[in-house]
Image (spheres, rainbow, N blue to C red):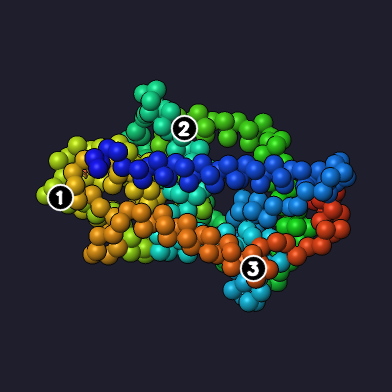
């Protein structure tokens, strides 16, 4: 098979599209459930727990609660499960969650592909790129300081049972359905910027990705380049959604690496650019297989052990959702 026909990038797009489609479907079902809960709609629709995957702050608090008390979050258990899955993936499989699962990454990738076809691609100079790269780490440090350092057990437990945390999923729904002019402008600006820059949200602003990237430094899976075989065509760098200078390295150990393996797929020289686990070459399909296998294994475990659906009784959910938007953020 010629390398240019490598099916891996097509497989990645299909997997990303599948997860994005599922997230849109879950969002739609959640909207219907919410309408039923506040009495606008008569027909009951089960609440899709997967929407909790969009509550990473709540999940970080819940993770600290789990570590302090040994008790699993009963309010947004699916959010905690998805967060743990992403962390485990980060440790073993680089940013496989970002590269293969996250719908924001997929949207960003599509925008960048469109921009490349329209010849809009911009590469920020290093002096600008480096400070911009640090923003997401500063945001990560801010949340880690607030939640992991400042919040003691009492504050964590108080947040977990607070009315705000119980309806934070509805707040998130409203954020997307009725964004403020500022939030809407920022989202639109990022989308337009994604046409010209490679993944600006993921690359510069996402603290979730920053955390997974740092964990990914411990992962034994990496991309390896044979310097002798390389013909310096730079196709790998043009394909890399994380804008990593691959030809300057023999092993890619960069926290920005998504584990997408687009670079391996486009390299025209056999055995020049490969996926490796430590010193051993591995199939490029191993990373997506393990990423998806781990994700679904944790989902199945959570589902079959009662750690997926919220334990909040429906009448309480209906009461909280009816108050929803009037509940302020806890101080
Ligand atoms: S270095 Fe390769 S695997 Fe890592 S993000 Fe770039 S293209 Fe993907
Ligand atoms: S695509 Fe392969 S041959 Fe071309 S520069 Fe990258 S590693 Fe070298």
What residue would you read off at disc 2?
111
Residue pictured at 51% horizontal, 59% vertical: 295
Q: Secondary structure at mark 2?
A: helix
Q: Which residue is mark 3?
A: 304
Whether disc 1's CB lies below 8 Å from ligand 2 is answered no
The image shows residue 70, relative to residue 308, as above or below, that is below
Q: How many marks?
A: 3
Quadrant that contains the C terminus: bottom right
The residue lying toward the viewer, choosing from 53 and 304, is 304
At 38% from the left edge and 25% from the top edge, which residue is drawn? 117
Q: CA distance from mark 3 to mark 2?
A: 38 Å
Q: Residue at x 72, y 47 (%)?
A: 30
| Residue 264 visible to an observer of this rendering | yes
Does residue 167 lie above or below 199 as drawn?
below
Q: Nearer the viewer, residue 328 or 61?
A: 61
Ligand 2 is located in which of the four quadrants? top left
The x, y position of residue 253, in whole percent, is 31, 56
Residue 243: quadrant of the picture: top left
What residue did someone put label 1 on?
227
Looking at the image, is 220 positioned above or below residue 274? below
């Amino acid at each position: 098979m010629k390398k240019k026909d490598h099916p891996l990038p097509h497989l990645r797009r299909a997997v990303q599209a599948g997860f994005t489609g599922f997230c849109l479907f879950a969002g739609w079902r959640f909207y219907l459930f919410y309408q039923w809960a506040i009495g606008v709609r008569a027909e009951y629709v089960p609440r899709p727990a997967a929407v909790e995957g969009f509550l990473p702050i709540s999940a970080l608090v819940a993770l600290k609660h789990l570590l302090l008390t040994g008790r699993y979050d009963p309010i947004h258990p699916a959010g905690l499960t998805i967060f743990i899955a992403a962390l485990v993936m980060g440790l073993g499989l680089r940013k496989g969650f970002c590269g293969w699962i996250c719908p924001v990454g997929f949207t960003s990738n599509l925008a960048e592909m469109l921009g490349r076809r329209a010849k809009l691609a911009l590469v920020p100079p290093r002096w600008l790129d480096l400070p911009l790269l640090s923003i997401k780490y500063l945001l990560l440090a801010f949340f880690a300081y607030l939640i992991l350092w400042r919040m003691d057990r009492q504050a964590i437990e108080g947040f977990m049972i607070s009315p705000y945390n119980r309806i934070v999923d509805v707040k998130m729904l409203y954020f997307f359905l009725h964004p403020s002019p500022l939030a809407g402008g920022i989202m639109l600006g990022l989308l337009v910027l994604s046409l010209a820059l490679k993944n600006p949200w993921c690359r510069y602003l996402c603290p979730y990705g920053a955390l997974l990237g740092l964990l990914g430094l411990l992962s034994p899976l990496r991309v390896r380049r044979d310097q002798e075989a390389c013909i310096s065509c730079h196709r790998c760098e043009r394909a890399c959604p994380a804008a990593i200078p691959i030809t300057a390295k023999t092993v890619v150990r960069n926290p920005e690496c998504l584990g997408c393996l687009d670079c391996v797929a486009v390299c025209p020289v056999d055995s020049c650019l490969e996926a490796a686990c430590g010193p051993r070459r591995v199939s490029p399909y191993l990373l997506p297989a393990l990423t998806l296998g781990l994700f679904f294994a944790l989902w199945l475990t959570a589902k079959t052990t009662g750690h997926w659906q919220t334990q909040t009784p429906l009448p309480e959910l209906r009461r909280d959702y009816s108050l929803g938007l009037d509940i302020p953020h806890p101080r």
